[in-house]
Image: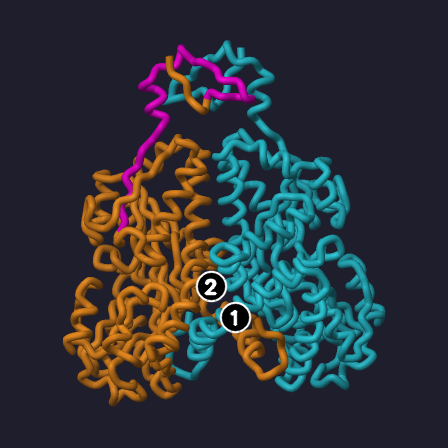
Chain colours: A cyan, B orange
């Protein structure tokens, strides 16, 4: 005799002897959920955990996800393959990781001087973004959901001030993807290192500059010990988006209500990551400056223009490499043009006004 | 013999003669969901519809919401009372509507020169916002969820340019809540009109200026026919937040998985409204300018400082009226202080850099 919560109706427990145990267990799905992050890595690992907790709470036992940190089942860069092949059912990683397989996924991650998180979200949910993202992840062999944004990142940590292109020449920096290409074009030596190697490289002098993401994500890494100049704006990462990947057969076999639960929990997780970063960046930034003597620095306009000109060349070249990249980039570029006008008039204009000098209560 | 989808397990339909029909119908809840908006009003009505559709899809028939537009069951300003008393089970409206009942709800809506949507979201989900919002809505007698942000609004439509405080004197304007108080202090005549009356008032000359929210929300209203100067920034509304209200007994009686479904669908709906506004403001703004000859105008800094100084007085006075208002405002004010540093270094710094002059591909 099997007694299950789904048979409790109107407060009365019903014993359903007619239902075989295997049938019920088939209706209680368990997914292994691999992530490309250490468990509870600020923003990314915690963001993946948010999604897992959300589905587990909302599905009431009918779908249960178990989170595995990077390396527990597969290493970070094998999460996609594990999900696509059915070794595991689902996972959380970053579009940026898959550009070697389907180049257009690089644009889904972000591009320098591109879309902010809010603009990217609007493109994904209310523009052509969802259809185009699905096309890219179809080519990668998995079902996709947008699942997290870092928001505007910082521009990186440097041992010495960076005021001009001359200051970049022969500097050893660790910037990835398109930003790495831009630094290369401006004369820097771009070093390829995994996330776990970068602190040691900065400490030893093998690196002069690097970035991970933003104050919350970088706090535990202690870059401030070896590089005091903390630059903004993060021209190279107006946001970086994350992905949820689901094995296609698993996805197709879900009943509609569980599909909806996954979809809305993914949308919640997408917003939650940005909220978590936003909430935590501010206090960590304060600690950097007040406690660790970090020097907040701003790239001068003249250098930003050099970064932007080089970015223009890099993204054009990448977009012309294959039709899908071109299609995705053109859509994002068109969105950028239209959105920038609105963003400048709303968010930007407001933020500048709020920064004027006036009498206002303080907490 | 009753056959239900929830009894289909592992693909095999199970006839559950032992379960009485009333018990099942008790497990299939129906909520009347009243809104303070016309059906599908851009952003607000569509935002409420998003939540209803989300819950209906995710709950698989166990909880079904039926949306009622403003006036179908109760008028907009009676939605709270209807939910609190149990006349209906739930609804969607705006904290700003309830400041006459519990003053602190006015701060939950927003305050001029206050938090952006992203900052408000971070405060709600990862700061003290949820606990404080719950305290306010407990006093209002309903369960609360944050459910939508407009994002930064425009500063309003004016028949004549507004360049100084002198240009406001004796002008008849329709601004509500704290913004209305600010306009009053600067010498304008603030007229109280409902949303349905404002177009006619602008046409007849009974109003010289007004605002509703932003291009997407204002497009159908055709303000451009009677007032050509469209101002930014929307200093008075860095965002305006919306609420979901649920009858407390109904909420308490939900099983945990349905509670989770409501919670995550509300979080999705909260993000969706901002995304919908963001996606649609840009093209509508373009139509205003290119097709309707609207003159995009920016308040000069000197006037913004006057607005801000007056705002400082208005919010201080309101915050001192009762302990709950003070508590909510102090928390938001502290959040504002810390967040502004981060926002200026991230979003604002990036948006300014993106606006520099450089070579970049165009769509």
- Residue B146: percent from left, percent from top: 39, 52
Circle 1 marks a residue in which chain? B
Q: Quick check: A218 left or right of B282?
A: right
- Residue B75: percent from left, percent from top: 19, 51
Q: Nearer the viewer, residue A13 or A338?
A: A338
- B160 to B86, vertically: above or below: below
Q: Splitting the image into 4 quarters, where does residue B255 fall?
A: top left
Residue plotted at (38% across, 73% down): B113
Q: CA distance from mark 2 to mark 1?
A: 8 Å
Residue B129 seen anywhere in this rendered image of the structure = yes
Element marked by disc 1: helix
Q: Quick check: A351 left or right of A313?
A: left
- Label 1 belongs to which residue? B343
- Residue A90: percent from left, percent from top: 65, 40
Marks 2 and 1, the one that precedes in the sequence: 2
Element marked by disc 2: helix
CB contact under 8 Å: marks 2 and 1 = yes
Residue B323 seen anywhere in this rendered image of the structure = no
Give the quadrant of the C terminus of chain A: bottom left
Residue plotted at (39% across, 68% down): B284
- Label 2 belongs to which residue? B119
Q: Crowding near pointer 1: few (<14 within 10 Å), some, many (20+)?
A: many
Circle 2 marks a residue in which chain? B
Same-chain check, marks 2 and 1: yes
- B354 to B69, vertically: above or below: below
Mark carried by residue B357 = none
First to last magenta residue range: B7-35
Q: Nearer the viewer, residue B177 or A81?
A: A81
């Amino acid at each position: 005799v099997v007694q299950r919560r789904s048979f409790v109706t109107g407060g009365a427990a019903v014993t359903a002897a007619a239902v075989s145990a295997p049938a019920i267990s088939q209706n209680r799905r368990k997914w292994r959920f691999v992530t490309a992050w250490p468990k509870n890595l600020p923003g990314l690992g915690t963001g993946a955990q948010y999604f897992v907790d959300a589905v587990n709470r909302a599905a009431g036992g009918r779908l249960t996800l178990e989170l595995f940190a990077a390396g527990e089942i597969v290493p970070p860069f094998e999460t996609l393959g594990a999900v696509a092949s059915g070794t595991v059912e689902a996972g959380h990683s970053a579009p940026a990781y898959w550009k070697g397989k389907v180049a257009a996924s690089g644009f889904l991650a972000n591009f320098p001087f591109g879309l902010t998180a809010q603009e990217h979200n609007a493109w994904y949910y209310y523009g052509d973004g969802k259809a185009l993202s699905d096309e890219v992840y179809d080519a990668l062999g998995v079902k996709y959901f947008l699942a997290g944004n870092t928001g505007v990142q910082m521009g990186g940590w440097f041992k010495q001030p960076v005021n001009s292109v001359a200051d970049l020449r022969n500097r050893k920096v660790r910037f990835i993807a398109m930003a790495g290409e831009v630094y290369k074009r401006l004369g820097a030596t771009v070093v390829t290192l995994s996330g776990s190697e970068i602190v040691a490289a900065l400490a030893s002098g093998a690196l002069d500059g690097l970035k991970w993401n933003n104050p919350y994500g970088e706090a535990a890494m202690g870059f401030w010990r070896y590089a005091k100049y903390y630059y903004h704006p993060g021209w190279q990462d107006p946001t970086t988006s994350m992905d949820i990947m689901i094995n296609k057969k698993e996805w197709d076999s879900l009943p509609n209500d569980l599909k909806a639960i996954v979809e809305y929990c993914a949308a919640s997780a997408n917003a939650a990551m940005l909220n978590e970063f936003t909430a935590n960046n501010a206090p960590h930034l304060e600690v950097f400056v007040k406690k660790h003597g970090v020097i907040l620095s701003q790239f001068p306009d003249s250098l930003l223009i050099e970064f932007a000109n080089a970015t223009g060349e890099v993204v054009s070249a990448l977009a012309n490499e294959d039709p899908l990249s071109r299609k995705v980039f053109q859509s994002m570029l068109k969105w950028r043009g239209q959105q920038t006008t609105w963003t400048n008039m709303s968010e930007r204009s407001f933020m500048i006004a709020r920064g004027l000098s006036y009498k206002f209560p303080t907490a």
